[in-house]
Amino acid sequence: MPPMRIGILTGGGDCPGLNAVIRAAVRAVEVEHRGVTIGFADAWRGVLDDRWEQLSIARCRGILPRGGTILGTSRDQPYTRPDGVDAVREAVARHELDAIVAIGGEGTMGVVSDLHRDGIPVIGVPKTIDNDIAQTEMTFGFQTAVQICSDAIDRLHTTAESHDRVLVVEVMGRHVGHIAVWAGIAGGATIVLVPEEPFDLDDVAARIVARHHHGSWATIVVVAEGAVPVPGTLDIGEPEIDRYGHEVLGGIGHLVASEIQQRTGIESRTTVLGHVQRGGSPVAFDRVLATRFGIAAVDSVSAALSGAAPFGQMVALQSGHIVAVPVADAIGHLKVVEPDLLRSAAILSAQPAGSPPASELTAG
Ligand code: F6P
């Protein structure tokens, strides 16, 4: 086999561990395939505008623990430009690439699937702190985000107890509640609200009042940014839409806190963790997973070049093993929180058997 040449890019929102993938892929290409990796700037925008840099083991020194992405990222993609796919095809030819390795979330995996259909050699690497991509048990960045959130909840406990307040913590989780549930369980939150299960604030308020009646003071409520009320129970207004047509989330925490205060009479405050969850150094688990994904992506390119497997694969974690699956199988549906985890979170907020039902209690 001649030396391998790949292009690599990071697309969509950033996430801790992107640099670890880049570093691992660059090393695998150089060490195992005597090859060269080209890094495209700002995701597909760099492919379309021909902005790139040649990467090397030396260039990647020191980036393993660094958050963000040395390549930059954007949500631009080829299919929104009339000449986009041809421009990608030309970039592959111009740089004599064997493949493009695209690291990104569900949107990027959709582009990988479409480009594969259009005959461009591509391999996908899933990333998102939300951990919602199907076909992979975990995405890197998720464990880092969970750690940041559970550390924050630990801190909020002591101030909530001092003031006997309800503290609402809003975490990321656009369509699913993986971060909220994991951080809620790890941080010992009282109530966790997730997109998978629309919430009823009367019920939430009654559970908080019941808790106070039983002598448990201070309450931590974790709410995923994408959590929604039971239809007809609360007006959450119209979301703002960004230039890519995505809803700009954030703010449900404030609404939940103010409604809880109104309904219970207990002072409530909100902390929105926001992009803090996406910044900084990846935890060890994410560094290892990202490294394994980076090496596996190069293995997938190699397998496709030798004819052992097709392009259009996405690397994934399944039963602890790194595998490659058709990227088409990973798009169009999201991985929601397992019912047993939701049950664990619910047990945290339940009152012991024999307690009067929450609905019979009033705010004190
Ligand atoms: O997809 C990951 C995510 O962190 C979501 O939870 C969040 O809604 C979104 O990114 C926000 O992205 P940005 O602010 O970069 O548009």
Image (cartoon, grey):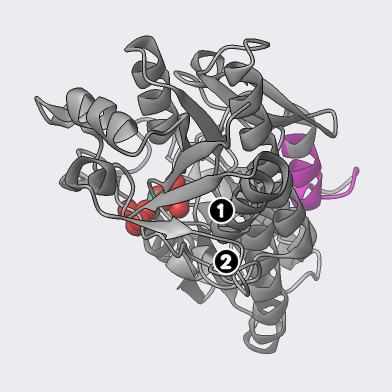
Camera-side residue: 340 or 257? 340
Where is residue 145 drawn, in percent x and y?
61, 60
Where is residue 298 drawn, in percent x and y?
63, 36
Camera-side residue: 50 or 242? 50
Camera-side residue: 330 or 360? 330
Asked if one can make out residue 362 in the rendered structure from this viewpoint, the answer is: no
Instruction: Look at the image and say whether residue 235 sits in the magenta stretch.
Output: no
- Apparent side of residue 228 relative to residue 89 in the rendered image (left or right): right
Q: Is mark 2 within 8 Å of ligand 1?
A: no
In the image, the segment drawn in magenta is: 342-353
The circle on residue 22 is: 1
- Please state which amino acid type lies under the numbered disc 2: Cys
| Mark 1 burial class by Cα count in 10 Å: few <14, some 14-19, many 20+ | many
Upstream in sequence: badge 1 or badge 2: 1
Q: Residue at x 69, y 42 (%)?
A: 295
Asked if one can make out residue 317 in the rendered structure from this viewpoint, the answer is: yes
Where is residue 353 drawn, in percent x and y?
90, 43
Kindly state the secondary structure of the residue where label 1 is placed: helix
Q: Is the C-beta separation of discs 1 and 2 under 8 Å?
A: yes
Residue where numbered disc 2 is placed: 60
Instruction: Look at the image and say whether residue 344 sits in the magenta stretch.
Output: yes
Point out the image quarter for the N terminus: top right
